[in-house]
Amino acid sequence: MRKDLLLIALFLAAAGSAYAYDDHDFSVWNTDVQEWKINGGSKIALEEEFRWGDNAREFYYQHYDVGIFYALNKYWNAGGGYRHARILAGNSWKTECEPYAVATLSRVFAGFAFDDRSRLEYRHFDYQPDAWRYRNKVTVKLPWEWTRLKLQPFVSEELFFRFGGTNQFGENRLSSGFGLNLTKDIKAEIYYLLDSVKNSKGQWVDANVLGTKLKIAF
């Protein structure tokens, strides 16, 4: 176990030195996922996520997400769902309701596993005009596994494009970390993420994120 933790620490430190900048906020994100197989390659997924910012001292974001997904063939997976998010703005909580559709292409080349996910969201707000958003996330799992926990490194990038009102490329997330198997049905991730968001003044604001994810399959 000590060897596992050392490998994780070294990998995340390398990722942080590659992308981190001075004087950027530090955040902590935690995601929990429960999956139920229906039949064949179909499943229902329930997700909760919680985020702390201001150097991880203030709880500012949470969402609940339910979706259903279908394996169309060995390469394509598609589905849709609904996300309910609450965001702290000033001293009050704002709500976002977000139905979405998603399609993912999965391929393997020379042992490297690639996932290319496209996601289209309709964003209904209680505090500003509604808008559409397209997200594209590419994840690469490296062909190595270490220790009995099967630590497998991965890297990913996700691009966000906003539509409605102002059409623009508005956010970029770069991340790197490890996936690991705790048991046959319980998997986890720990990662570093650089979240770059364009604010209302057109300036890019970065946050350094330490993220964890726990997934349980039933």
Image (tube, rainbow, N blue to C red):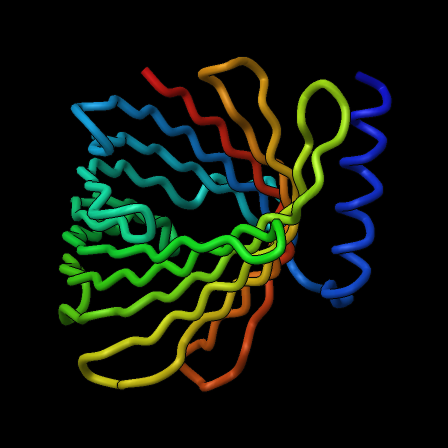
Residue appearing at x 50%, y 14% in the figure:
184
Quadrant in the picture for the N terminus: top right
Rendered position, 32 above or below 122: above
Q: Nearer the viewer, residue 3 or 49?
A: 3
Give the x, y percent position of residue 141: 59, 48
Q: Is residue 213 left or right of residue 87?
A: right
Closer to the camera in the image, 136 or 99: 136
Residue in view at x 21 percent, y 40 percent: 69
Name above or below for residue 151 compared with residue 110. Answer: above
Residue 97 horizontal/vertical position (percent): 16, 51
Q: Nearer the viewer, residue 41 or 135?
A: 41
Residue 102, quarter of the rendered image: bottom left
Q: Is residue 118 visible?
A: yes
Where is residue 45 shown, x and y percent of the image? 26, 31
Quadrant containing the C terminus in the rendered view? top left
Residue 171 figure quarter: bottom left
Q: Residue at x 78, y 45 (%)?
A: 11
Q: Quadrant of residue 189?
A: top right
34 is higher (above) or lower (below) than 138: above
Q: Residue at x 18, y 47 (%)?
A: 79
Q: Position of residue 167 (x, y in %)?
A: 27, 85
Q: Image check: 19 left or right of 87?
A: right
**Number of numbered discs present?**
0
- Left or right for 67, reference 9: left
